[in-house]
Image (cartoon, grey):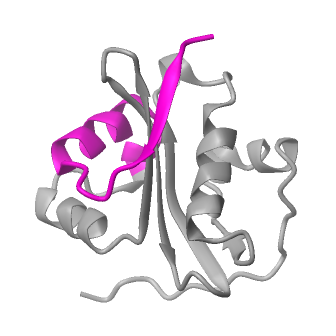
C-alpha cells in the first residue's frame, strides 16, 4: 500500500482537481471543460480533503458543503483509478465527516459505477432523493 498524506486543502488549484477527476471516473459527470465552474466549485466548498503521495501527487479528493451542525453533503469523491481499492475513498469520507463535524449527517449521491461501493464501507442507502436539474 502506498504511503499517503491526507490534508484539508481549501486553496486547491482547479488544474489539480481537474487532473484527478480525469484519472478517476468522475470527470464524466463534472464540467472539466469549464475551469471557471470548477474553480467556483472549489472556492465555495466548505471542506476539501486531499490524499497525496509522498512526492506530492494528488491521488484522491473529497469535496463537501456543510453547515457544520446538521448536514454535510459530500459532492465529490474521486480517487485515481491506479490507486483505487486501497481504502483511500473510505479515509477521505471519514476525514471529511470529521472536518465537518461527526454530529452532522453525511449525505452523498452515488455515481452509477460506485453504487455498490458505499454499502461495502458501511454507509446506509436512502430511498428518497429528489433533484431539480440546472435550467441555465
| Residue shown at 82% from the left, 43% from the top | 121
How many discs mark residues in the rendered view?
0
| Residue shown at 53% from the left, 15% from the top | 3
| Residue shown at 53% from the left, 85% from the top | 67
Residue 69 position within the rendered picture, expressed as x and y whole percent measured from the top left: 63, 86
Residue 78 position within the rendered picture, expressed as x and y whole percent measured from the top left: 49, 42
Left or right relative to 102: residue 16:
left
Up the image or down, 108 lies above or below 44; here it is above
Left or right relative to 8: residue 55:
left
Up the image or down, 11 lies above or below 59; here it is below
Q: Toward the viewer: 130 or 60?
A: 60
Residue 1 position within the rendered picture, expressed as x and y whole percent measured from the top left: 63, 10
Left or right relative to 42: residue 90:
right
In this picture, which residue range is highlighted in magenta? 1-28
Left or right relative to 82: residue 117:
right
Membership of 74 in magenta stretch: no
Q: Toward the viewer: 29 or 53?
A: 53
Question: Image quarter for residue 10?
Answer: bottom left
Q: Toward the viewer: 122 or 55?
A: 55
Membership of 14 in magenta stretch: yes
| Residue shown at 84% from the left, 76% from the top | 127
Say which quadrant the C terminus sits in: bottom left
Residue 53 position within the rendered picture, expressed as x and y whole percent measured from the top left: 41, 20
Up the image or down, 109 lies above or below 18; here it is below
Question: Image quarter for residue 99?
Answer: bottom right
- Residue farthest toward the top in the current orientation of the protein: 1
Amino acid at each position: 500500500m502506498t504511503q499517503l498524506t491526507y490534508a484539508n486543502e481549501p486553496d486547491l488549484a482547479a488544474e489539480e482537481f481537474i487532473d484527478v477527476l480525469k484519472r478517476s471516473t468522475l470527470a464524466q459527470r463534472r464540467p472539466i471543460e469549464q475551469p471557471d465552474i470548477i474553480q467556483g466549485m472549489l472556492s465555495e466548498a466548505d471542506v476539501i480533503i486531499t490524499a497525496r503521495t509522498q512526492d506530492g501527487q494528488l491521488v484522491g479528493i473529497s469535496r463537501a458543503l456543510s453547515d457544520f451542525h446538521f448536514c454535510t453533503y459530500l459532492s465529490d469523491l474521486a480517487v485515481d483509478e491506479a490507486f483505487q481499492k486501497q481504502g483511500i475513498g473510505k479515509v477521505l469520507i471519514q476525514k471529511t465527516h470529521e472536518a465537518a463535524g461527526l454530529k452532522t449527517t453525511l449525505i452523498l449521491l452515488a455515481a452509477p459505477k460506485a453504487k455498490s461501493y458505499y454499502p461495502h464501507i458501511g454507509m446506509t442507502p436512502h430511498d428518497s432523493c429528489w433533484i431539480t436539474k440546472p435550467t441555465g
